Amino acid sequence: MNSLGSYLHELRFDVDIDRTPIDIVRNLKPDLIIMNNNMKKIHMLDVKVPYDDYYLFMANRVDNSRKYRDFQIQLNTHKRHSLTMDTINNGFLGAWDPNNER
């Protein structure tokens, strides 16, 4: 994550790695936060390493969507930023979730 964060920072994005986002919600800690303040957009990535099971991959995506839903609403209300949340699943035994490619 650090090398990706460094690369994005060079492209003039604000990047936080493994930190609690902003001051609105304190109990969330995604792996990567990419902010474009000019366009008022935030993209968060959360990396999961479950057992190699497609159903666990899908469950992780649904859980993260629910987990960050309130944060998304608060961010829109307080900061007027739009939030995109993605989950990257890399299986424990090396399986790759095809949905990571989108």
Image (cartoon, grey):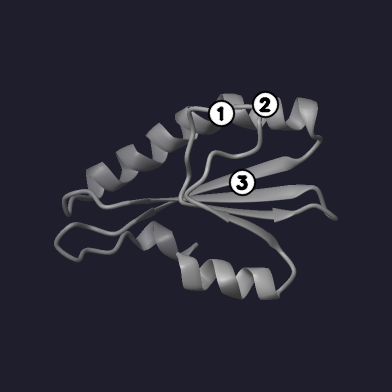
User: 10 Å neighbourhood of mark 3: few (<14), some, or many (≥20)?
Assistant: some
Q: Which one is nearer the viewer's eye here, 61 or 13? A: 13
Label 2 SS: helix
Q: Distance between the residues labelled 2 and 3?
A: 12 Å
Q: Is residue 95 left or right of residue 98?
A: left
Q: Is residue 85 left or right of residue 1?
A: right
Precedes in sequence: disc 1 or disc 3: 1
84 w.r.t. 26: above or below:
below
Q: Is residue 27 left or right of residue 76?
A: left
Label 3 SS: strand
Whether pointer 2 and pointer 1 mark residues with C-beta atoms closer than 8 Å, the reply is: yes
User: Residue drawn 39% across and 33% down?
Assistant: 63
**Which percent across, then down, holds residue 34?**
63, 56
Which numbered tag is attached to residue 84? 3
Q: How far apart are marks 2 and 1 (CA)?
A: 6 Å
Precedes in sequence: disc 2 or disc 3: 2
Label 2, on which residue?
73
User: Residue drawn 43% across and 36% down?
Assistant: 64
**Which percent across, then down, holds residue 96?**
28, 64
User: 10 Å neighbourhood of mark 1: few (<14), some, or many (≥20)?
Assistant: some
User: Residue drawn 65% across and 27% down?
Assistant: 24
**Which percent across, then down, holds residue 46?**
44, 49
Q: Distance between the residues labelled 1 and 3?
A: 10 Å
**Which percent across, then down, holds residue 94?**
19, 66
In the orientation shown, which residue stands out farthest toward the right?
38
Image quarter of residue 89:
bottom left
Label 1, on which residue?
69
